[in-house]
Image (cartoon, helix red, strand yellow):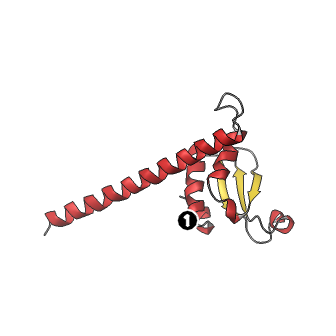
Amino acid sequence: MTFEHLDLPEKGRHIAKILSDYDHELHLVKLPPGHPFIAEQPDKPYAVIHRPIGLPEYIIKVFPESMLDERILAQVFEWDTSRFGGKLDKFDALGHARFILDERKRADEQEELREKMKYTLNKRRWE
């Protein structure tokens, strides 16, 4: 998690983490006030940014807060024809995005439980 994710709501931070795990050059960020895209579309303050190594970054697409969910991932999957052997349709991409989001949520919950169990076991050992 980077500092740029601090401006994102919790669900947006989950999406940003999955997005950067999927492709380290893609980032979900909240655009700063005064950014030209904010002036053009004030209802869409969030953006997927591509930061290729050695090249200038650019905004791929802007989103409203109401879209900080699996739809962002689904759009990225639709655009990424190199990994899916052609273009995914919207429904396949959305299903894939929901599956990944659910699996990440489940993995995070399991990790949290492991940490709690580890803490409890260590606490009992020293009592």
Whether residue 6 sits left or right of residue 41 in the image: it is left
Q: Nearer the viewer, residue 125 or 104?
A: 104
One can see residue 104 in this view? yes
Whether residue 25 sits left or right of residue 120 in the image: it is right
Image location (x, y in percent) of residue 92: 64, 39
The residue lying at 55 percent from left, 65 percent from top is 10
Q: Residue furthest right?
A: 40
Q: Residue furthest front?
A: 91
Image location (x, y in percent) of residue 41: 83, 65
Q: Residue furthest bottom?
A: 33
Q: Nearer the viewer, residue 108 or 71?
A: 71
Q: Residue furthest top?
A: 85
The residue lying at 69 percent from left, 65 percent from top is 65
Secondary structure of residue under mark 1: helix
The residue lying at 37 percent from left, 53 percent from top is 110
The C terminus, quarter of image: bottom left
Q: Which residue is mark 1?
A: 10
Looking at the image, residue 30 lies above or below residue 75: below
Whether residue 96 sits left or right of residue 89 in the image: it is left
The residue lying at 68 percent from left, 59 percent from top is 67
One can see residue 2 in this view? no
Looking at the image, residue 120 lies above or below residue 92: below
Q: Nearer the viewer, residue 84 or 90?
A: 90
Report the number of discs.
1
Q: Nearer the viewer, residue 96 or 15?
A: 96
- Within 10 Å of the Cα at label 1, are there few (<14), some (14-19), or many (20+) other Cα atoms? few
Looking at the image, residue 42 lies above or below residue 72: below
The amino acid on which the numbered mark 1 sits, given as a three-letter code, is: Glu
